Amino acid sequence: MKAVFLDIDNTLLSFDGYVKQTMKEGFEHFGLKPYEPYMFDIFIRENTKLWRQIEQGTLVFEELEKIRWNIIFKYLDIEFDGTVFEKYFRGRLFDSAIPEDGAYELLEYLKGKYILCVASNGPGEQQVHRLEIAGMKKYFDYIFVSERIGASKPSKVFFERAFVELNAGRKEIILPEDTVMIGDSLTSDIAGGQAFGMEVCLFRRKEGMDIPDGVRWVDRLEQIEEIY
């Protein structure tokens, strides 16, 4: 193993924790109905559908920003301009850096052993800023974010372009089989890494996931240290 690719959201930084906090505070800020836990489940359901479309190449992030909260508010029976809330939501996300349990310890462990690469779908400036304020950016040798690369995981193009940059000026080429993709998404991180010939490791944050045969997985980030 020569290089480790790590997802950001719900792998190193808690996107779920951010969403719950921002929905609660945002609904209060705009005078909407009080936040209840079921509302988070609706957000996850609808947001996941939209990101699947991005992964499949049938939707771009700019379109997601225009429709996401209008769709969610429809299911929550809230009459409010979703684009206004989207602007608030994205502004708060820009400065969000809630670490997943064990994230710092994992980075400390991996840094001395492998070349570390971020592999994230999302806006480039936002994702880099979040790593900076979390104190995590210093651990990475390369940062690959979909907006900057011009393609999203699990697209082959995302990984092709990442490996071109990874191997630029390198005498000994790093091959996909010399690397591992670690993340929480079966459809993005795991499917993309596998299709490109990388080893993969799923961070299974919730029990009950239907994990394909042959996919290595962990329930806690510290378990990764036992593998690599």
Image (cartoon, rainbow, N blue to C red):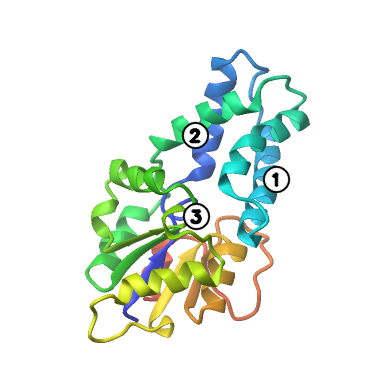
If you read the primary sequence from the N terminus, does the residue marked by circle 1 or circle 3 appear first?
A: 1
Residue sitting nearer the eye, 37 or 91: 91
Look at label 1 and name its amino acid. Answer: Arg
- What residue appears at the point 63 percent right and 35 percent down from the top-left corner? 66
- What residue appears at the point 60 percent right and 55 percent down from the top-left corner? 206
Look at label 3 and name its amino acid. Answer: Asn
Q: Position of residue 104 (x, y in %)?
A: 31, 54
Look at label 2 and name its amino acid. Answer: Arg
Q: Position of residue 185 (x, y in %)?
A: 57, 61
Disc 1 vs disc 3: Cβ atoms closer than 8 Å? no
Disc 3 vs disc 2: Cβ atoms closer than 8 Å? no
Q: Position of residue 134 (x, y in %)?
A: 31, 44
Mark toward the viewer: 2 or 1 = 2
Measure the alpha-carbon separation of dots 2 and 1. Answer: 18 Å
| Element on which disc 2 rests | helix
How many numbered discs sit on the rendered protein? 3
Q: Position of residue 93 (x, y in %)?
A: 45, 36
Quadrant where the C terminus sits is bottom left
Quadrant where the N terminus sits is bottom left
Left or right: residue 166 compared with residue 52? left
Q: Quarter-wise, where is residue 71 in the image?
A: top right
If you read the primary sequence from the N terminus, does the residue marked by circle 2 or circle 1 appear first?
A: 1
Q: Farthest residue to the bottom: give it.
A: 172
- What residue appears at the point 39 percent right and 78 percent down from the top-left corner? 179
| Element on which disc 1 rests | helix
Q: Which mark is residue 207?
A: none
Q: Which mark is residue 45?
A: 1
Q: Which mark is residue 121?
A: 3
If you read the primary sequence from the N terminus, does the residue marked by circle 3 or circle 2 appear first?
A: 2
Give above or below for 34 relative to 174: above
Disc 2 vs disc 1: Cβ atoms closer than 8 Å? no
Q: Which residue is mark 2?
A: 90
